[in-house]
Amino acid sequence: MTTQRYEPIDSGVTPRFAGHSTFMRLPVLTDPRDVDIAIVGVPWDGGTTNRPGPRHGPRQVREMSSLIKRVHSVTKISPYEICRVADLGDAPVNPIDLNRSLEDIRKFFSQIVEAGAVPLAIGGDHLSSLPILRAVAAARPVGMIHFDAHSDTVDSYFGGLKFTHGTPFRRAIEEGLLDPKRVVQIGIRGSTYSADERDWPLQQGIRIISIEEFEEMGIDAVIREARRVAGDAPTYISFDIDALDPVFAPGTGTPEFAGLTSREVNRLLRGLRNLNLVGADVVEVSPPFDPSGGTALAAANIAFEILCLLAESLAKRKS
Ligand code: MN
Ligand code: MN
């Protein structure tokens, strides 16, 4: 175990387009005891029900994250000055064995959590969140601030299949990983499989802020509501890139019309400082549908915003 902090490669020495591609140009480490925050790729889309591709997400997000500099534009915080942060590589996955992947991903994240580090995962499809939550919430249920066009609380697909990227949070609630009364979903919209699709999550006590309600409330009220629901207890952030409008994030498997803008996302995330954060993910970037790289750029920036939130939250807990 080291107390050393890690900095992104100095772009004044090695230009941004040179060197190995890692998250935020950080060093690649293998021992989670050496970090406070572990950025991890989950190159897996075994839960995808429609257009595939997020298995390629981590590589393209690593690539686009080379554009991001060290210091947050508004808070002036450098997460690397207050926490030990590194790229811990990719979780092991198996593209043709869903159950084995779920278990291997869980084990990888359990090692991180047991080492006392906080994971920031880059997916991967949204089923990736389930094994991560099994690791992060092993000791007690957590709350969640969930950005998505979809609630991802469907019971099953294709004749009873329980594990898809449309079901992770139903399973997480059934398994006691999430406290549904401390879950808020922001940006939910679009057509559904059935008229009663939202009944189950609402019955569990999840707070759903649809895009229509978001418009009526305004961003500041949405931030207040998200903070109220999450409270002071351990909270996870899950960001499905399809929360963004397809104009800003076309490179995803299940785009939904009329979503959040990039600026709204920045304002929302910047309203979530100093919560009790224990992990996060950014998922559903599908490079085959993202030839410009703009969706991966959005994901990289969202990951940096969340990294700053995690670092501040962690530094506060440790002080
Ligand atoms: Mn979605
Ligand atoms: Mn999702």
Image (tube, rainbow, N blue to C red):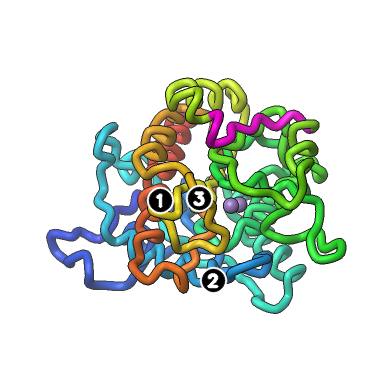
Q: Position of residue 193 (x, y in %)?
A: 74, 52
Number of marks:
3
Q: Residue at x 25, y 61 (%)?
A: 9
| Quarter of the rendering occupied by the C terminus | top left
Most foreground residue, 307 or 28: 307
Residue topped by disc 1: 85
Q: Are marks 3 and 2 in contact (CB under 8 Å)?
A: no
Looking at the image, can residue 31 be seen? no
Q: Tell which circle, 1 or 3, labels the residue nearer the N-terminal end.
A: 1
Q: Position of residue 25 (x, y in %)?
A: 31, 61
Residue topped by disc 3: 257
Most foreground residue, 157 or 142: 157
Is residue 83 one of those drawn in magenta?
Answer: no
How far apart are the two marked residues, 1 and 3, measured between alpha carbons? 35 Å
Farthest bottom residue? 96
How far apart are the two marked residues, 1 and 2, measured between alpha carbons? 27 Å
What residue type is disc 3 on?
Answer: Phe
Most foreground residue, 80 or 237: 237
What residue type is disc 2 on?
Answer: Gly
- What are the residue bounds of the magenta stretch? 204-213
Farthest left residue? 12
Residue topped by disc 2: 53
